[in-house]
Image (cartoon, coloured by chain):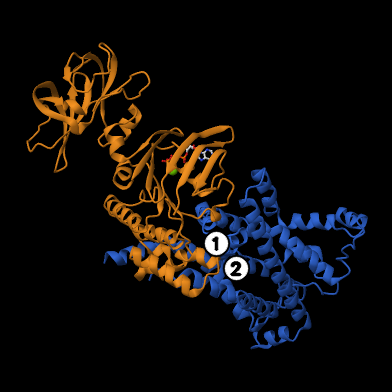
Amino acid sequence: MSERKGLMGALALVAPVQAIVTLVIFIPALYVLWLSFQSSTYGQAAQFVGLANYSRVLSDPYFWRALINTAVVVLVVVHVELLLGLGMALLFASGLVARPLLLAVVLAPYAVSEVSAVVMWRFLFDPSIGIVTQALLALGLPTLEWAVFPSHGLFIVALLSIWLHLPFTFIILYAARLSVPGELYEAAAIDGASPWARFRRVTLPLLVPAMLIAMLFRYIFAFRLFSEVWLMTGGGPARQTEVLAVYLYNEAFRYNQFGTASATGWLLVIASLGLALFYLRKIYKEMFANAPA
Amino acid sequence: MASVTISDMRKSFGKHEVIHGVDIKIADGSFVALVGPSGCGKSTLLRMIAGLEEISAGELRIGERVVNELPSKDRDIAMVFQSYALYPHLTVAENMGFSLSLKKASKAETEERVGYAARTLGLEALLDRKPKQLSGGQRQRVAMGRAIVRDPQVFLFDEPLSNLDAKLRVQMRGEIKALHRRLATTTIYVTHDQVEAMTMADEIVVLRDGRVEQAGQPMDLYDAPANIFVAGFIGSPAMNFFAATIESVDTLRLEDGTAIPFSGGEGLAKDQRVSVGIRPEHLMLAPGGAPSKITLVEPTGPETLLTLEVGHAAVTMVSRERRRFTEGEIITIAPEPDRLHLFDPETGMRLPQRQ
Ligand SMILES: Nc1ncnc2c1ncn2[C@@H]1O[C@H](COP(=O)(O)OP(=O)(O)OP(=O)(O)O)[C@@H](O)[C@H]1O
Ligand SMILES: [Mg+2]
């Protein structure tokens, strides 16, 4: 009886969150799923077309271009961020001079809105007058022709994305590193561990859960990559730097094909799940496998 | 096994010196306790021996070797931390065998040595568990197991029992002592608990503010403390102190006029001012003694702890008499005449007494 009451009380407490999630995520997602089986545009009633939208999207070379671009950028961004974040977390934990100041410097990009960041970067990397371009020229290095070559465009998008989101990965790994008690390293030093062995045998295993969490979050967010591309290259030249979210946006609001846009949305979900599956499984194992029954 | 010799060792953190020239000789195979109040530098001293803290000045020898500059791993010591510092991601067996796996020891050797440590400490059934699945006492044992596996010249313990409950602490106290008797490895044991030091150690070093106050066998420290600090620190409940003057070769007079008979005062001058120390267990009920009012009665079973008011001073007394004491009751007490401790009130040093 009282257990039942407790359950009802608990449900009442989580109900507002559930209601919001239902309203803004669950129902729209189902609506989009329904829409993905319809042919729909402005001023016209939706009409059931079965899997036609999916086959249209899957046979569109621009979709595959966007999918490959997304996968490459996401893989590069997430892994480079992980390596850089880990390295910086260890560097910070090993004791730096002026650590509070440096911490503020490192975290600053996270406070910058994506739009302002892109505007800044466009200016910095402007192919003729940008400061970075000038600097590269002065050093005799090749410059980034991101408005001309798709590979340069994607490279600068990846770079910008890393710069914007590194603070997230860094702060998670840094916090995890700080929570490792110093005595473990002293015990390891007495046990005869070299600095490398201390990293390999103590630090790394203890940071794995935090690394998995950070990567999972970054996978999910990186997959939604939109404003960096939209504002930097606009998907051009010749739709060669489009990513999935940009492709979806174009379908929906340039070509007004809500059916195919919805189908793209679900394909995006499936693709990101596919990429993240490995990490989800690992996290699941880490978190629940040795939890007390 | 090896002896440990500490000569004029000093430690400064920045400009701030916290260990001010400590000399300790620890015989091969002995069990030495470092005791002292919080902040006196026990942990710092131990960490200097372990190589976790740089030695600012002085010399540290383990056996014949000067090890000042050697890294921890080459000093052939093992340390048990207060927090145990077990590797949370490794099993009990892996924790204990960590040092061997770093040395790339063979599987057979690892199994043999971990197995031996596990048998010694009764951990065989727990070898596959992770630290978080163990009780405090079991973690403590694993930490000791990790030290045993290394078969070091010297064991270092930093307050290893302070996270355990009272009963387990007494049990582990016995186990550590038994272990030392079996392995006979030189052991340095840091504690702030003088009972632990008294019960376990062959020799006690009392530290205060980064200096050695006295070193010696437990009963020597108890019977003849070198100064007021050691007298007050060793023994529980703590010693009572009174200001007094020497009246004659066998009589002291307290400030409130009470005369106390004592023996062994041949070397002392008449009218000399002294501090008298009397242990609570050396006070007796005595007809004709000093009248005292009982303010608190704390029976523990075998004995009764009494807090008394003698004149204006609060005095503790331990009585083994099977008699009912009531608060507010007036009793008369006197010390055992040959168990008084006399100190110079200025320097705090023990005055010469014939025992
Ligand atoms: N890393 C450090 N930097 C500065 N001062 C320190 C440092 N470590 C210890 N001290 C100082 O050295 C003195 C001795 O400290 P230590 O930890 O050795 O005391 P302890 O006897 O072990 O005390 P406790 O019984 O509380 O553990 C203290 O005054 C402490 O403030
Ligand atoms: Mg300490």
Tell me which amino acid carries mark 1.
Val
Determine the residue positioned at 18% across, 31% down.
B282
Pointer 2 chain:
A
Viewer-side label of 1, 2: 1
Task: Return the disc, 1 or 2, that comes first in the chain's sequence.
Answer: 1
> Which residue is drawn at the image coordinates 16% and 16% (left, top)?
B259
Q: CA distance from mark 1 to mark 2?
A: 23 Å
> Label 2: few (<14), some or many (≥20) within 10 Å?
many
Which tint is chain A? blue
Instruction: Say which chain tag 1 marks.
Output: A
Indicate the position of residue B147 as horizontal and vertical percent values: 44, 58
Instruction: Give the quadrant of residue A254.
Output: bottom right
Which amino acid type is shown beneath numbered disc 2?
A: Leu
Left of B93 or right of it: where is B60? right
Front position in the image: A170 or A5: A170
Q: What mark, if any, has residue A216 been given in the picture?
A: 2
Q: Residue at image x 50%, y 52%?
A: A183
Q: Position of residue A7 (x, y in %)?
A: 35, 65
Residue that carries the numbered disc 1 in the rendered image: A202
Position of the C terminus of chain B, as image quadrant, is top left
Which chain, by letter, is orange?
B
